[in-house]
Image: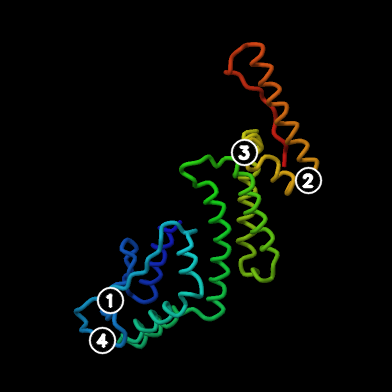
Amino acid sequence: NNGTMLYEFARLIKRDTGRVWDPEERCIKGPYSKHRGTCLRRSRTCTVVINIPHDSSSTSTKIFLSYRNQQDVDTFVYEIGMQEVSLEQRAKLDRLRLTASEWKRLDLFANLLGYAGGAQHAFSASKKTTLHLAIPALESLHKAWSTRANSDKYAFFQAALKGAAEKVNEYYEKTNNTDAYIVVMLLDPRMKKLHLLKHWPEELQGEAMDCVEEIFKTRYLKLQSTGSGDSTGSVSAPKR
């Protein structure tokens, strides 16, 4: 998660440069001026703050990871290096600068995180129900990551993408444990059968409809025979 990432970043900064990066205040504190080209006495401290939202899938985080901040980050690393008296420490700081290929890789990584962000936001509504979006969100995320795992463009992330897709599929299979996901998806007036017709083969479409029809039939008969709404039928959802 984002907190773990910040503490790991702090550990690496201290290991490679000897500088202390505060993961709580999210800043590097050192004897440097915040104004370019101005060197202060060693007793003074400058704080350079990098704001990173707690929501690691947010647009601002992806922007931070993208090309749009490349120049600012490179300039920051260069300037703190130039203020370092020790050539050895300066060399360590210089090695923190990313190469062009590393920036490109970081941009690709931000794109991959965007798919996870979309799936997360589908489950994050505070004022409306989201259960009907569970299956579409998981299917969309799995497709995005599994197809890119076989793409030369994302070859560096292949192992991670395959592992991530397997984990998504693991959670997807758990939706077979209850018919609620199918029922609420078909009950949503904006969705109904649209997702099934577009993304599921005819055989699974038929199984889903049979499942829901049987549930309503069982429920209806229970209501007619007992006059009570306490009982529900038990029908297996279609296995996907």
Tag 3, which secondary structure? loop
Name the residue type under label 3: Asp
Q: Quadrant of residue 86?
A: bottom left
- Few, some or many residues within 10 Å of mark 4 (<14, 14–19, 20+): some
Q: Quadrant of residue 18?
A: bottom left
Mark 2 and mark 1 lie on one chain; the one further toward the N terminus is 1
Which numbered dot is residue 39? 4
Q: Nearer the viewer, residue 7 or 192?
A: 192
Q: CA distance from mark 1 to mark 4?
A: 12 Å
Residue 238 rendering spot, x and y as whole percentages: 72, 36
Mark 2 and mark 4 lie on one chain; the one further toward the N terminus is 4
Tell me the mark number nearer the camera, choosing from 1 and 3.
3
Q: CA distance from mark 2 to mark 1?
A: 61 Å
Residue 202 horizontal side relative to residue 10, left or right: right
Residue 116 horizontal side relative to residue 25, left or right: right
Residue 149 rendering spot, x and y as whole percentages: 67, 63
- Which residue position is annotated with label 1? 30
Location of the C terminus (image quadrant)? top right
Residue lying at the far right in this picture: please name it.
Answer: 203
Mark 3 and mark 2 lie on one chain; the one further toward the N terminus is 3
Tag 2, which secondary structure? loop
Tell me the mark number nearer the camera, choosing from 3 and 2.
3
- Which residue position is annotated with label 3? 188
